[in-house]
Each structure stands twice: as C-alpha cells, then as structure tokens.
Image (cartoon, coloured by chain):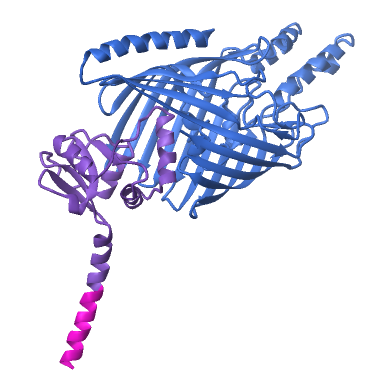
Chain colours: A purple, B blue
Amino acid sequence: MATLQSFRLLGTSLLLGFLAGAPVCAADLVVIVSARSPVAALRADQVAAIFLGQSVRFPDGTEAVPFDLRLGVPMRDEFYARVTNKTPALLKAHWSKMVFTGRGQPPAELPDSAAVRRKVADDPEAIGYIERSALDGSVRAVLVVQ
Amino acid sequence: MQQQRLVHFLLLSLSGLALTGAARAQDKPDWRISGFGTLGVVHASEHEADYTSSVFKYNGAGATRRWSTDVDTRLGVQLDATLARHWSAVLQVVSEQGLDNTYRPRVEWANIKYQATPELALRVGRIALPIFLTADYRKVGYAYPWVRPPVEGYNVMPVTSSDGIDATLRWGVGPVRNASQVFYGHSAVNLFDALRVYGRRGIGISNTSDWGALSVRANVLSAEISSNIGAELFRAFDAFGPIGQDLTRRYEIDHKRMMLANIGVNYDPGSWFVMAEAGHTVSHSFLGSTRSAYVSAGWRWQAFTPYATYARVRAAGATTDPGLPVAALPPALAPTAAALNGGLNYLLWTIPQQTSQAVGVRWDLRTNMALKVQYDRVTPQEGSRGTFINPTPRFVPGHPVHVASVALDFVY
C-alpha cells in the first residue's frame, strides 16, 4: 500500500517536473537589462511594447533601447512568438506599417547572445534577450520567457 | 512644380542638417533605403464601367479592358535619414497609374521630424493624412491582409497626404498605449486638363489606442475644399437668376467645409483577426455626404490567411436634384435648363452607393513577400455608379459585378 502510494507520488512528481521543467529547459530565453539598470522585473506585455516600438520607456520612466537578434536566428522567432504572438511574417507586416508611416524603425540587430549581452551590459538603457545559459553578472534577467 | 520646390527645399534642409549632425562625432548621419510594391492584375465582368482602386486613376478593369494591371500595381521607395540625435527626415516616392495615365512618380511623403522628447514628435513637410485605420500605409499592400483596402470606405477620401505640420504624442494609461496626433495642412491635387482640387486649412485629430491585441483608431478631419470641376456648368446656372444661383451655392465645390469622421477597430491575437471601420463624410457640395462601413475577418493557418469582407457605402442625402424648374421657364430656355439639370445630376451620380462582399486568401511566400487572390462581388446601388469610373451611357447600376484580383506584394 505504502509502496503503491510512494510510487504514485513519484509518478506525479515526475509528471509535474516534466510539465514544468521541459519547456523551460528546451528553450530557455531571458530578457535582460544592464546590471547597472534600476529595472528589476518586466511583464511580457511591457517587453512586447518596447520591442514593437509602441513604448519608448521602461515603466520607471527611463528610456528603453531594444536590441534584436538577426533575422533568421531561431531564438528571435521564438522570442516574438512567445512575447508578442507574432510570426516572422506578421512582425514584418508590423514594421512595414511603422516604417512606411514614419513612426519608427525596427531595433538594431546583433549576431548572437554574446553580442547582445555585451551591448546590454554597457548601456543602462539597453534591453535584449539571450539564452538563460548565457547569463552572467554583467546583466540582469527581468523576464523569463516560457 | 510645387513638388519640385518641395523636394528642393527638403534636400537643402537635409544637407544643412546633415552638416550640423556630422559636427557631433557620436551622431553620424545614417541613411536607410526601403521600399514596397505590388504587382497586380484584375478582371471585372462589367462591360460599361471600370472597376478601380481610386477615383484618381485613369482607367481600370471592365469597360476599357477586361483585364487591367493598373488597379493595384505600384512601386514605392523610401529614404529615411537620421540627421542628428533628435532629427530625422523621410522622403517617399510612389509610382502608380494616375489620372494622366502615366506612372510618373509622385512625392507621397517628404518631411522632417524633430523628436522633442521620446514621446513627442513634430513633423513639417508632406505628411500622410491619418484618416482611416490603415490610411497612412494604404499603399503598402504587404502591411494589410487584403489585395486593397475596401474601396467603399477608402474611395470617399482619395487624397492621401497634405503639406503642413503635425505633432504626435505617445502616452499610456495602465496597459493602454495611445498615440495622439494633430495636424494642420493644405493639399492641391491636379486632376486632368486644368481641373484641380484644393484643400485649405485642413485640421485633423487622430488617436490610436493599443491594448494587447486590440487597436482602436478614431479620426476627425475638416478642410475647406475648392475645385473648378463643373465651373462652366455652375456659371450657366448663375445666369438663370436666384434659383440657379441657389443651386450653385448648394453644389459647387467653392470654399466648402468638408468634414470626415472615422472610427476603426482591429483585434489581432495572431492566429486570427477581425477589423471593422465606419466613417461619415459631409461635403456641402455635389460630392454629397456619405456613410460607409466594413467588417473583415481572417484566420491564419501556416502561411495562409483566408479572409472575408463585407463593405458598404451609402449617400446620406439625395443623389438626384430636380434642378431648374424647366416647365416654369420660357420655352426658348427650357432645352438649356434641361441640359444643365442633366449635367448636375451626372455630377450627383458620382456620390457612391455600393455594397460588396469579398473573399480571398493571402499566402506569405517569404518574410517580405505575399501573394493574394481575391474575389469581390460588387453591387453599385440605384442612383449611383458606386466606386466605378468611366461609365458609358449604357451603364446601369443595381446588378452585381464580379471582380477577380491577383496581387504580389513585397517590401524590401
């Protein structure tokens, strides 16, 4: 009886662990700001507004300058799919509206997580996204994208 | 001529600002070229009039030729320049068929922007009129799901830009992000021969509110319009004394305050969308007053977006006028009066009354290219030629016209 219960418990915890852990481990993205930035945490909609050019400031009022990964990098597509619900085509349509109405230009692009981390670490106004494994003390994770 | 002067002014200002900008080491001037375009072909079943996307087109599909590539085909090139930390400029040139039947490029945008604060931007120059949900990118096919914005609403206001100033303020209330814009400007449109339309002292307010997947845009525009369209007809009416002069006052586009109000809603959570828009125009002239609306919905499945649209436009007043009382006039004047009445009613006949249903599919071929196929069932209503142009004397409204379109949209 006790064996069965502990077996069940084990099964449940395995299942829970799988449900909770698997998506995070598979592609763990973090949104980062400089360690010198006062921003502690952001919601997904706040990050989306900054990356879509709808908001030019962090919630505390300091200016926000987003940095993107290059077009075609899978992590970029994943970031936009999860944070803004936009496919690469929808994102392109969004920026076509912004650019051809003079309302803004898309974020500057960098080649990889290391370049984004370097850029963000140096600039308290910068915001970017990298793999969780690329985190270090120079930057602060303000949102874990799941 | 005016365009040349505008370009000249802009280039001079650009070079001037570029020099000041370059003086600051960290703010090097930065240039970007981008563009958009559409290759389209349209077939219409109507034999007695042309279906087209704007009244500012020379012809379309139908009476002139069964298949037309002039309805949607266009190419736009945009030059964006960052001049200094808060200064930027944009020049957009668009080539598409105009009323002169050429693809002569026209300056659609030419303005300088000063970003006073991250929230407040001021612009001077030629600016797109923010009068519809998709107004300022209505020429960028790639940016919307359809082959073209519903003509029933958008044809009511074919003027797309004006020369003047505007201010845009971005502000937020909780999760709602707003962009409020006010503008003031003039516009002059050369039609054909010596015909012109002027919009003076145009003033407008536009507000866009985004809340997650929901976007709501409301616009109001008022301008004093004048035109020499029908000038000879109205001078002839004037010769008939007070009754004729009264008709001229009512219908001639002579310093008339035109008003346009519009509200649009877009809900787009990603896998599907719904858009709806309603507008009202008042012109105090033979352009009439109209009410228009459309609703469109689509669903995104992989690279395909099937969609359906219902649109309508109705005159908010009469589209005919008895004109001069022919029977009460001396017999010698009666034929002239009858001809003038005919001329007036021909003008009033251009006030659009039309209903259309459309289905189509957008196929995103690549991240900067989309192919669209669309079928429109367009029915001009009684007493109007709808949005059709070049009607022959045999054109009869009231029956559906079948329109098939294929368009390839791209941005670069």
User: Principal SS element in the magenta part?
Assistant: helix
Query: Where in the figure is residue B25, as x and y percent of width and height?
Result: 20, 17
Q: Is residue B407 magenta?
A: no
**Residue bounds of the magenta highlight:** A1-15
Identify the image quadrant of residue B61: top right
Q: Residue at x 84, y 15 (%)?
A: B328
Identify the image quadrant of residue B40: top right
- Is B282 left, or right, of B80 in this rendering? right
Query: Where in the figure is residue A10, as x and y percent of width and height?
Result: 20, 80
Q: Is residue A8 magenta?
A: yes
B58 or B16, nearer to the observer: B16
- Is A135 left, or right, of B205 in this rendering? left
Q: Residue at x 21, y 15 (%)?
A: B24
Query: Where in the figure is residue B372, as x and y percent of width and height?
Result: 58, 43
Q: Is residue B306 above or below residue B96?
A: below
Q: Residue at x 18, y 93 (%)?
A: A1
